[in-house]
Structures are given as structure tokens and as C-alpha cells.
Amino acid sequence: MKKSLAFLCMLLGLFLIGSLNGYHFTSAKAIPGDVIKVRSLAIGEFGQAVLFEDRTNQSFGVAEIEKRYGFLYRYQGGSSGYSIEQGKPFQASGIGDRHAFLVAIKTADHSKIKYIVLGNHIEGITPSDHYELSLQDVKENRAAYHVKEVKDGYALFVLDDYTEDTWTIRAFDKDGKLIADKLLGAEPRYIN
């Protein structure tokens, strides 16, 4: 009887160790590396989108974290190692799968960027085109955009899926004036 109980306990222990492999008690610990969680947003019932800073190389990224049993977290993938190039207004990092499309944006130090907007309602804009757009125009076309206020230099979005429009990024100042953009396929730039 004792041998059977010991064998059962050993089997249960092996099962638990195997099933918990890769799980952590905090979402930040689940992300590979020496990271600090900046902010997170829920991805439905599935888990969390975590915007993080990597202390090793002073970069940032975004990770998809699965939540299990209400208190365990497991890394499901992410993008990392992003930093702002000199002279650029912001840098974006994104990842998508069947659960969601995650976008993390970091603004340049001492930036006047107050709002980040994903989306587009203006057809056919190329990086060489001059165009006008204000935050008021965005509000009037609300269905075509996702808006976040920049906090501590970051914005985080959790969207249903990737589209060309959700990878069109614009930055506005506190007065609603367009000051920077990143059109699909182009680099982030300041708008004069």
C-alpha cells in the first residue's frame, strides 16, 4: 500500500512539474530577460498584452502572456529589442496572432506627443504626400481610429487583428495638431 501511494505521489509530482513548465506567478517574470513591466492590457479571457522595458539593453517590447488557473502566466511570444533612432519621433513594436494584434509605442524623450492614433480614413496617402489631419478629424471619423493618450512616454493597444490601417500611426500634440506619423511601409517622421 505504501509503495502504491509513493508511486502515485511521484506520478502526480511529475505531472505537476511538467504541466507547470514555463509558468510564472507574475506576467513580468514570464517574459524572457531582465524586464520591467510598464503596463498591461487584457486580451479577452486569454491573457495579457504586456508592454515592457528590457534593463539589459535599454530597449522595449510587447509580449503576449497567457493566463492560466487565474494566477499563472506563460510567455506566448513577443517582439523586443526596440529603441528610438536618433531624430525619430517614436518607435513602434507589434505582434499578432489569432488572439489579437498588439502594438506598443515609445515616444522620444522630451517629446510633445500627447496622443497616439492608429488607423486611417484618408485613401491613397504616400510618404511623399502633404496632407492635413487633426485630432478633431480623427474624432469625427471615430470608427476608423484607435486613440490612446501617451503616459510616461508609452502607448499600448490591443486590437482584434492586423490591417494596413492599424499599422498607420500618427502622433498629435496636446492641442490636437499632427506632429508625426508612420505610414504603412515608411519610417516614423516628424510632420512640418
Image (spheres, grey):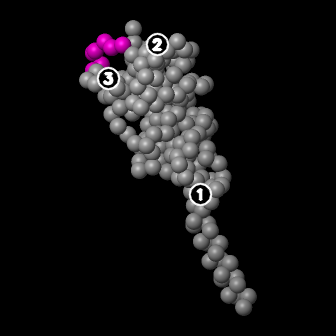
Q: Nearer the viewer, mark 1 or mark 2?
A: 2
Q: Residue at x 49, y 15 (%)?
A: 176
Q: Is disc 3 in contact with disc 2, using a CB cutoff of under 8 Å? A: no
Compute the Cα span from label 3 to label 2.
Answer: 17 Å
Q: Residue 25: image x %, image y %?
A: 66, 52
Compute the Cα span from label 1 to label 2.
Answer: 43 Å
For label 1, the residue is 68
Q: Amino acid at mark 3?
A: Ile
Q: Is residue 20 visible?
A: yes
Give the residue furthest to the right.
2
For label 2, the residue is 177
**In terms of secondary structure, where does tag 3 sit?**
loop
Tell me where the magenta segment starts and ends, as one range. 126-132
Q: Amino acid at mark 1?
A: Arg
Looking at the picture, tell me which residue is in the foreground, 13 or 153.
Answer: 153
Q: Is residue 71 left or right of residue 187?
A: right
Q: Nearer the viewer, mark 3 or mark 1?
A: 3
**In terms of secondary structure, where does tag 2 sit?**
loop
Q: Residue at x 49, y 28 (%)?
A: 147
Which quarter of the figure is the N terminus placed in?
Answer: bottom right
Q: Residue 142: image x %, image y %?
A: 44, 28
Q: Residue at x 62, y 77 (%)?
A: 11
Give the residue furthest to the top.
192
Q: Residue at x 41, y 31 (%)?
A: 143
